[in-house]
Image (cartoon, rainbow, N blue to C red):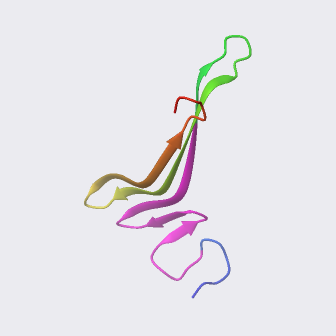
Amino acid sequence: MFTGQPGVWPLPWAYLRHVITIPGFGTITLAKVTIKHEDPHEKTKAPKKTTVTLTMVDLKLGCFVDGNLSMGNGSTNGGPDG
């Protein structure tokens, strides 16, 4: 039963907002947004290109199987060419 306190469940896993950690399995991250700035302008240092990536489910396995798995990905650079 949920106690009403974030991260407190009487279950063998822990969560913090959108990150779920399961001992012996790994970490599940839900709705992860990554922003990458590239190619800064010489004078202003403002990025000429910004890429935004949305990953709906990101798994980092830490059990007998080691690896990463991402599902439901999409990205854009906000520019006219892609």
Residue 67 on image: x %, y % = 31, 51
Residue beneath the point at 65% across and 24% down: 47
Question: Does residue 64 lie above or below 67 as drawn?
Answer: below
Residue 24 on image: x %, y % = 35, 66
Find out whether residue 30 is within the magenta segment.
yes
Residue beneath the point at 51% across and 43% down: 75
Residue beneath the point at 52% across and 33% down: 82
> Residue at the top extreme?
43
Find out whether residue 62 is within the magenta segment.
no
Pick whichever, 72 or 6, lies toward us.
Answer: 72
> Residue at the left extreme?
64
Question: Does residue 2 lie above or below 19 as drawn?
Answer: below
| Left or right: 14 as drawn, with respect to 59 | right
Q: Quadrant of the N terminus?
A: bottom right
Residue beneath the point at 58% across and 30% down: 80
Magenta span: predominant SS is strand
Question: Does residue 31 lie above or below 13 as drawn?
Answer: above
Question: Does residue 22 lie above or below 52 as drawn?
Answer: below
Pick whichever, 2 or 58, lies toward us.
Answer: 58
> Residue 37's image quarter?
top right
> Residue at the right extreme?
44
| Left or right: 56 as drawn, with respect to 37 | left
Pick whichever, 60 or 31, lies toward us.
Answer: 31
Magenta region, residue range: 8-35
